Image: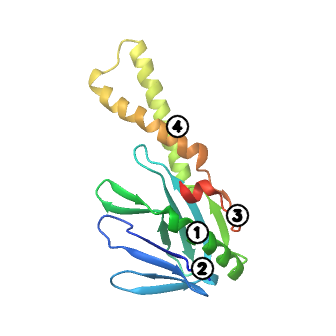
């Protein structure tokens, strides 16, 4: 039988945590503790992928237990500041199998792919605000009243538009078939 194991460092400040699929539960372990959650206890699952402007994409699987809180698995492992190791080779198979086991254990679980709805709406608002700010700056420039010291701020806003567009265009939350998750959400 195939063993599904995935380990990663969720942040620069934390140690590595490993996850494995047991017969009836997801089990995780780090240098301080070991814990688990039964597949049937997971009420909601979201998988998403985000490509930063610089660097490689990371995929995340966010589990929401019935008892509250969340458990986050990531395909990227922080090594040091600015360096994230791609661990999709162990992440994707574990998440595929995890989704199937949750669906079997809890047929009422909700599965979605894409950015969480609240985050997607935030990106949409930021994108619209950025476009309006740039249009205002363009209007001021055409009237010859553009404040030159504001040019740096306008460049920062302009640089954020492609990221915002990518999230809004591709990151909208959608229902997910747990037995056939989209590969782009598993590998970035």
Foreground mark, 4 or 1, reads: 1
Q: Residue at x 50, y 39 (%)?
A: 127
The image shows residue 113, relative to residue 179, as above or below, that is above
Q: Residue at x 52, y 67 (%)?
A: 91
Residue hosting label 2: 2
Alpha carbon distance from label 4 to label 1: 37 Å
Alpha carbon distance from label 2 to label 3: 19 Å
Residue hosting label 3: 180
Q: Position of residue 113 (x, y in %)?
A: 62, 59
Q: Position of residue 54 (x, y in %)?
A: 40, 44
Q: How is the image coloured?
A: rainbow
Any mark on residue 119, and which?
none
Q: Earlier in the sequence, mark 2 or mark 3?
A: 2
Foreground mark, 4 or 3, reads: 3
Mark 3–mark 1 CB contact (< 8 Å): no
Q: Earlier in the sequence, mark 1 or mark 2?
A: 2
Foreground mark, 2 or 3, reads: 2
Alpha carbon distance from label 4 to label 2: 47 Å
Alpha carbon distance from label 3 to label 1: 12 Å
Is 164 positioned to the left or the right of 148 in the image?
right
Q: Earlier in the sequence, mark 4 or mark 1?
A: 1
Alpha carbon distance from label 4 to label 3: 33 Å
Is 28 positioned to the left or the right of 173 in the image?
left
Tag 4's secondary structure? helix
- Are there few (<14), some (14-19), or many (20+) residues within 10 Å of tag 4? some
Residue hosting label 1: 93
Tag 1's secondary structure? helix
Counting the numbered discs, the total is 4
> In which image quadrant can residue 23 be found?
bottom right
Residue hosting label 4: 128
> In which image quadrant can residue 105 be found?
bottom right
Q: Quadrant of the N terminus?
A: bottom right
């Amino acid at each position: 039988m195939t063993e599904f194991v995935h380990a990663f460092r969720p942040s620069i400040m934390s140690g590595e945590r490993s996850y494995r699929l047991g017969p009836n539960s997801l089990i995780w372990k780090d240098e301080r503790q070991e814990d688990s959650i039964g597949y049937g206890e997971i009420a909601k699952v979201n998988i998403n992928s985000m490509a930063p402007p610089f660097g490689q994409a990371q995929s995340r699987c966010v589990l929401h237990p019935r008892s509250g809180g969340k458990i986050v698995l990531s395909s990227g492992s922080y090594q040091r500041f600015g360096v994230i190791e791609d661990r999709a080779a162990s992440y994707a198979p574990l998440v595929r199998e995890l989704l199937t086991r949750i669906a079997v254990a809890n047929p009422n679980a909700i599965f979605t792919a894409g950015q969480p709805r609240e985050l997607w709406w935030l990106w949409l608002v930021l994108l619209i605000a950025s476009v309006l700010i740039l249009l205002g700056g363009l209007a001021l420039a055409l009237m010859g009243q553009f404040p030159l010291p504001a040019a740096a701020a306008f460049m920062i806003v302009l640089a954020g538009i492609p990221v915002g567009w990518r999230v809004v265009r591709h990151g909208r939350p959608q229902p997910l078939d747990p037995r056939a998750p989209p590969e782009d959400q598993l590998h970035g």
